[in-house]
Amino acid sequence: MELDNYTGKYTGAGQTIVIIDQGISTSYTNSNVVYSYDFADNDNDAINSGGNHGGQVANVAQNVASGVKIIHLKVFSDGSSVAYSSNIEEALQWVVANTDAYNITAVNLSLGSGNVQTPTTWSGSDEYQALDDKGVIVTVASGNSKASYSYDGVNYMASSESVISVSATNENGEFTSFSQQHKDLTDVAALGKNINVIDNNGIAHSISGTSFSAPTIAGSAAVLQEAAMDLLGHQLTDEEFLDLIQKTGDKVGGYTINEGATTTTTNTTTTNTTLFNKDTLVQTQSAGAAVEVPQVIIPKTDPGLVVDDGTILTAQKIGALTAGVKLLQDSVTKETDDKDFFQFELSANGKVDFLLSNLSSDVDLNLYDSSGKLLHIGWEWGSVDIGYQKTLDAGTYYVGVDYYDGYNKGVTSTYDLSLTLSDVSPAPEPETPVPTPNSDGTIATANKLGTLSNGAKLLQDSVTKETDDKDFFQFELSANGKVDFLLSNLSSDVDLNLYDSSGKSLHNGWEWGSVDIGYQKTLDAGTYYVGVDYYDGYNKGFTSTYDLTLTLSDVVSPNPTPSSPVGYTKINLANAVTYLETHQNEYNDQIVLEA
């Protein structure tokens, strides 16, 4: 997934971004790196045998600003999941002292912990203010633990008025299921779901987390400051930068505001922090302070004593889901207890959000129907949160938590598994498309479904390899709305693709094998096409039936709500550059002193 839509001449050239993070892997190479230091081990080697989170963060920033210089400041000891706030403060002090020498434009911190609703001080707050005074833009990830809290909030290190708190959106411009945000503390949002990064072997990996939203803003700062120097002859202040990206961005949609009592703030002398390791939270702490585990406010079931749930037949029965969140906490251990299965019931059709979080190793999250047939394979690279949504019919289902990491024999990973049921509705009546399937293999001959109305439309048909391998359906939206697309009950590998009125591809939906495909899109009023495409090249002449469900919800007016929080805005870098180019006079006010 691309991070921004800007393809112009500015690349962040002449600017420097500092990455205060976990460090870089032994295989990390980056010709743009101009300095590195390890404040945890007090040496010039920023390599961390425990991961490449800092390298991935830098990769995201450079995807936005390819010409920017990078400085890596490592604050975690080699192979350790513990960092000290004193080391983070030392790194910030170094930035204050070396801003001019390296022309530092932005500092990125994809770390922190907690969920606060008001600005909170910690030992690095003075350095935040010093950087603000020097015009350095500090971007901080808002946090990935939304499911762990009942109220909106951000990680305490992102709450300062001297930094830019960055939340994460998905490809639809909506907050992700994991992103923390707060109407008064979130300053801006950026893509944080399924971001592509390239490793040193040229292989693309998809990663998620507010850790990767924050460097998008840091990279944008480098681009806009280069543009400002070119157009204005001086850099933007941090206030001007934030105002620019807020007023030219795209409003985030589909959120709710959940206000509550302010959570306990962090002690300013013994500060607990957390590194956002990819999409997962790795515990860190201050010197002398115990690691504080955030309280789980959502009612939960604790199956920790159950050890015989490693098959579908012995799955733990958690009963019928009701609207809301069910949180399960347990653990898996490689080779001795590497699978946990949970059986749940749905009394009616509904959407279920599955989220596996707080992992310390590579664990998968898979979904099965009542017969044990695999419906969805949920996986990410490494100890990364896994989340997806499925629209399911009433019935019995199984979710499996599977320890995947083959390198750590006997290592245990705890986990939080959240099942969230919403949009409970009766089952739609199936309809067979007309005309016959053989004549609907192109957009020009697509079945016309008419205008979608609120609720679900279920279509049942089939595709056959080489003889009838594509079905297209045309549908209309009379107003903006969210549409859930679900392709299910397959017997072969079939894809589900979405196109606009001109036939341009909007989304490619695919899974490995005969697995359900589901995704949600927020669409404007207009005409669209959905294509069902038989992909499996091994089974010539093989037929797969399918159920295609289109569910329309949240029909909205074309204009965003004017009263939405100003920070609930996703950056649009192309718009920001264009505005700066066409409104230079707004940034060139000079104060003339009388002689």
Image (tube, rainbow, N blue to C red):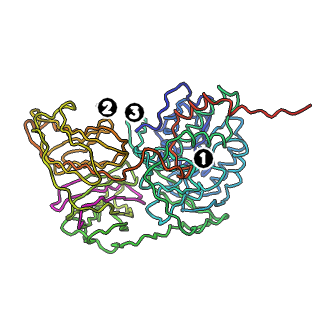
* Magenta stretch encompasses residue 354: yes
* Mark 1 vs mark 3: in front: 3
Q: Secondary structure at mark 3?
A: loop
Q: Position of residue 554 (x, y in %)?
A: 37, 53
Which residue is label 1 attached to? Answer: 38
Few, some or many residues within 10 Å of mark 2 (<14, 14–19, 20+): few
Real-space CA distance between mark 1 and mark 3, rounded to the nearest whole angstrom: 27 Å
N-terminal of the pair, mark 1 or mark 3, is: 1
* Mark 3 vs mark 2: in front: 2
Which residue is label 2 attached to? Answer: 504
Residue type indicated by callout 1: Asp
N-terminal of the pair, mark 3 or mark 2, is: 3
In this rendering, does residue 535 appear at all?
no
Residue placed most toward the observer, 468 or 478: 478
| Residue 308 to residue 160: above or below | below
Name the quarter where the N terminus is drawn.
top left
Residue 202 is tagged as 3
Q: Position of residue 549 (x, y in %)?
A: 22, 50
Describe residue 162's horizontal placement relative to residue 407 as left or right: right
Residue type indicated by callout 2: Lys
Residue at 56%, 69% (x, y): give it: 261
* Contact check, label 1 and label 3, Cβ < 8 Å: no
Describe residue 415's horizontal placement relative to residue 286 as left or right: left
Real-space CA distance between mark 3 and mark 2, rounded to the nearest whole angstrom: 28 Å
In this rendering, does residue 253 appear at all?
yes
Residue at 35%, 45% (x, y): give it: 521
